[in-house]
Amino acid sequence: MIKQSYSLPLAAAIAAAIAGSSAYANTKPTQDVIEARQETQIWTTYALSPYLRANDLQVSVREGKATLTGKVAEGVNKDLAKQIALGVDGIKSVDNRIEIIPNYKEPEQAKDRSYGEKVDDASITSAVRSKLAWSRYSDDLKAEVQTTRGMVQLSGTADTTEAKDAAGKLAMNSHGVHGVNNQLTVQPGKSVAAKSEGTDIADGWITTKVKSTYMYSTNVNGSDIAVSTNAGVVTLTGKVDSGAERALAIELAHNVRGVKSVDSTALTM
């Protein structure tokens, strides 16, 4: 667990970090308040970093100088901690006392999720919900999404096995997801999937959602793929690293609501 050099509940820490735009808008903050904000900003960034959050790091700030202590396994993590501190407004120097201990054993994972883990899980949940919402199977799903330490659980109902399986694949192929527990129950009903493929879906909307799907997904480098849509036909242009990436890019595009077909002739390896 990452610690500050003073005792401060997380809610108070976050409040202090953002207080500059509200509570202190009309008053000049004291030096103690400025330093508390700086410590909080550094600590919060450490808590959000997957490379630092599991280390036992402490931060204190005095007159623009940040002092860092704790233990890490690699020099690159020590340098990262320093650069994060230097990036905080008002920090002029860093006394980096963090020890590099090869084979350093991180503290045992706490029963309760850390702040950083909660943020990661919330981001994953939001991404998966978005991908399901603009999927061609959205009308066939009534899905709830919950994430705990990268493990996604899908619950609710799906009209078809195909919709259930597609939901599981979309969830699994999302950044930060370690596994998916697909508890969707198939309850056959009157499928309205055909409505999702009608011409009333704007081409611009389709293009945006295909790009967003790539952005949220693993195993596809969306920055290397140009996307355009005309009358529901999506055209993919660019280069991919493998046949598997190409096939996945095509599948993800085809699964977006309103897509009639995908032209991938200009998507090369």
Image: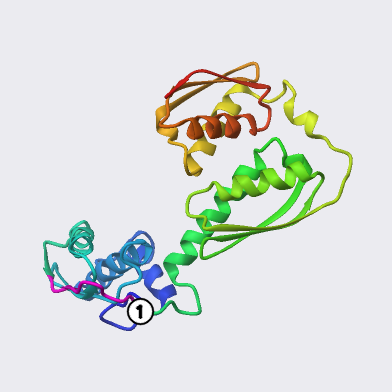
Left or right: residue 251 versus residue 89 is: right
Given residues 211 and 266, the one toward you in this image is 266
Quadrant occupied by the N terminus: bottom left
Please state if 34 lies on the left or on the right of 50 as rendered: left
Q: Check the image and name the residue furthest to the bottom.
A: 7
Q: State which quadrant residue 240 falls in.
A: top left
Q: Which residues are magenta?
A: 96-106
Question: Is the magenta region chiefly helix, strand or loop?
Answer: loop
What residue is drawn where x is 60% and y is 43%? 131
Residue under label 1? 107
Question: From the viewer's perspective, is residue 206 above or below residue 82?
Answer: above
The percent position of residue 146, horizontal first and vertical second, equals 62, 61
State the image quarter where residue 107 is shown. bottom left
Residue 2: horizontal and vertical position, in percent?
33, 74
Crowd class of label 1 (few under 14; some 14 to 19; many from 20; radius 10 Å): few
Dot 1: element: loop
- Tell me the kind of residue under disc 1: Pro
Can residue 107 be seen at all in this image of the molecule?
yes
* On-image quarter of the C terminus: top left
Q: Position of residue 214 (x, y in %)?
A: 50, 37
Q: Quadrant of residue 23?
A: bottom left
